[in-house]
Amino acid sequence: MKFEAGEAAMSWFQKLVPSRIRTTGDNKRTVPEGLWDKCPGCNAILYRAEMERNLEVCPKCGYHNRIGARRRLDQFLDEEGREEIGAELESADPLKFKDSKKYKDRLLQAQKKTEEKDALVVMQGRLKGLDVVTAAFEFAFMGGSMGSVVGERFVRAVKRCLELGIPLVCFSASGGARMQESLFALMQMAKTSAALGRLRQRGIPFVSVMTDPTMGGVSASLAMLGDLNIAEPNALIGFAGPRVIEQTVRETLPEGFQRSEFLLEHGALDMILDRRELRERIADLLAILTHRG
Amino acid sequence: MDMNFLDFEQPIAELEAKIEELRLVGDDNEINIQDEIERLQTKSRELTESIFSRLTPWQISQLARHPQRPYTLDYVAHLFGEFHELHGDRTFADDQAIVGGLARLDERPVMVIGHQKGRDTKEKIRRNFGMPRPEGYRKALRLMRLAERFRLPVLTFIDTPGAYPGVGAEERGQSEAIARNLQEMAALRVPVLCTVIGEGGSGGALAIGVGDRLLMLQYSTYSVISPEGCASILWKSADKAPVAAEAMGITSERLQELDLVDEVVAEPLGGAHRNPAATAKALKEALLRALGEIASLSPDALVERRYQRLMRYGEFTTAA
């Protein structure tokens, strides 16, 4: 599935709230802003600050809202000793791609919107004292699509892991390969998968955490190659998009198709973990895999 | 309209029809019209040359999907002295959208793996239009590992609209099957030569396309998504497929310029289907040459070289 990042739709409730009491400013979030949110899962009206404390998981029904890459890593890593990797890389637009808009302009627009240079953020840091390299996809950046920069940053993450002999954790959220980079984008699937092969040979753990959504070329490369494949609840995960499948098979898809629970049942995942326990559990799992106390 | 010819070839089709008519007249009346036939044949060839010298990417993508274009098993018949097809992934099924087997390229034992489309309706369905399910990719992987154990070079032939988008395929882990192949092919300790012979459709193509050399037949295409798919997403209309084909750079010529493809194998005038034997001959020469270039490398050197090549994929800038 390949698509453009949709604008986060405003909930009906926000529309009711007068604009003057909405929070504004630099505090950009991928979830809608405002004092109150309506949970897409259970329709409960939730206090914004409480949602933030709860890592954007609905305290009533456990619905997991999407969160941005930087916030994701921020809540996952220890506060001390972080270092970003590959931040200097930017897309070169080798095809001079243009549809209704120039790819260059789409990039600028996405950069402005997300304050990221591309759709993957890589950060070395510590997880409860354990040295790790982490990567997170920014879905708000052109649908988290994988082009040359995403591929190269991911490979640099792997290289750092190989140099230091430390584990890799990746949070994916992507529509797939980036169409505007055509075959260059496709080849990132081979590039990232090959790099992960080296990690595997060296016996260095790779934990893949699939979040909503993880589709297409990202799912069919790095995301499915975890020593441990983990997903957040109810994330859409698959190769082909549900609409494409529906058009091909011409029947309605089964309830829960391509959701985390469906994948767990069909053997594609080791486990589903609630976002609020990811830090604890992955730290425990990595401690076991790396023979630490 | 002659179905043997594509839209843009209709002027050629008309000339060919005229030549055929003249032949019939000649047979009936015993009048010597050989000169006229020859004149028209020259004209037809010149017209073909002229049309084929300025094909658009969209026209090339139609050629890549031409119903008469040679498929993997057609090339197998021309390329190899022996071929023993091997079936099944040993786990679930034998996916007939991918064929594979042991073969000899001249004297040299090799493993052959390729997508396979069907010729008539019944076979098209049996081959699932060349769209593999996970068991197809897992069969391919099984054969690659077999090749590795017995030190056989792997030759793959790519020709698929894409991996099959179906419920069962998703249930059985289409993504995982593709991803696994990418990882394993990157580290396979035997030479791997990949050739796009028709449609190189995205991840479903790449899943048997990671190797030491990437070859493309002249009128084959390779892209991240079909022109129709790209057009319907970015232009909101599948009718814009010709524009999308142009924008994505899907032709062998463009991809060689972009350094994504190592070698383009020229096709006979009018495309591979006009002369499959000649196409196969050119392909065989290219494969033997490519194999010769890497034959002397040790498995370690081969794998390292392939890995470094993969790591070079991508175009980006480094900001100050």
Image: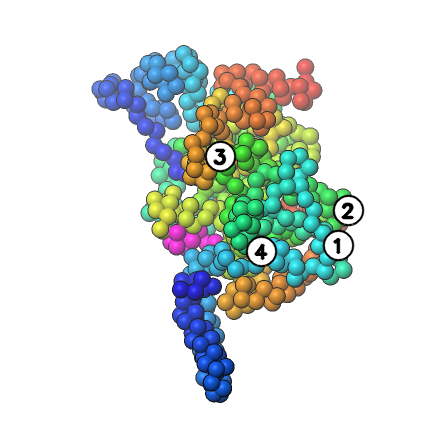
The answer, for residue A79, to whether it is visible in the render is: no
Give the percent coordinates (x, y) of residue A173.
47, 31
Image disc number at residue B150? 2
Q: Is residue A47 left or right of residue B285?
A: left
Q: Quadrant of residue B236?
A: top left
Q: Are marks 1 and 3 on the same chain?
A: no
Q: Are marks 3 and 4 in contact (CB under 8 Å)?
A: no
* Residue type at the position of mark 2: Phe
| Residue pointed to by mark 4 | B71
Quadrant, the C terminus of chain A: top right
Label 4 is placed on what type of residue? Tyr
Q: Residues within 10 Å of mark 4 (few under 14, many from 20)?
A: many
Marks 3, 4: nearer the viewer: 4
Q: Secondary structure at mark 1?
A: strand
Per the picture, the main secondary structure of the magenta-coloured stretch is helix
User: What distance separates the C-alpha of mark 3 from that of mark 4?
Assistant: 30 Å
Q: Which residue: 52% across, 69% down?
A: B269
Nearer to the camera, A31 or B136: B136
Q: Earlier in the sequence, mark 1 or mark 2?
A: 1
- Region of the chain picked out in magenta, as a range: B241-250
Q: What subunit carries mark 1? A: B
Q: Tell me the distance, in whole angstroms, between the alpha carbons under discs 4 and 1.
A: 21 Å
Residue, x 56% and y 50% (percent of image)? B123
Marks 1 and 2 in Cβ contact (< 8 Å): yes
Residue located beneath label 3 in the image: A215
* Crowding near the residue tagged with mark 2, few <14, some 14–19, many ≥20 C-alpha atoms within 10 Å: few
Q: Chain of mark 3?
A: A
Callout 2: SS: loop
Mark 4 to mark 2 CA distance (whole Å): 27 Å
| Neighbours of disc 1 within 10 Å: few (<14), some (14-19), many (20+) | some
Q: Position of residue B52 (x, y in %)?
A: 46, 67
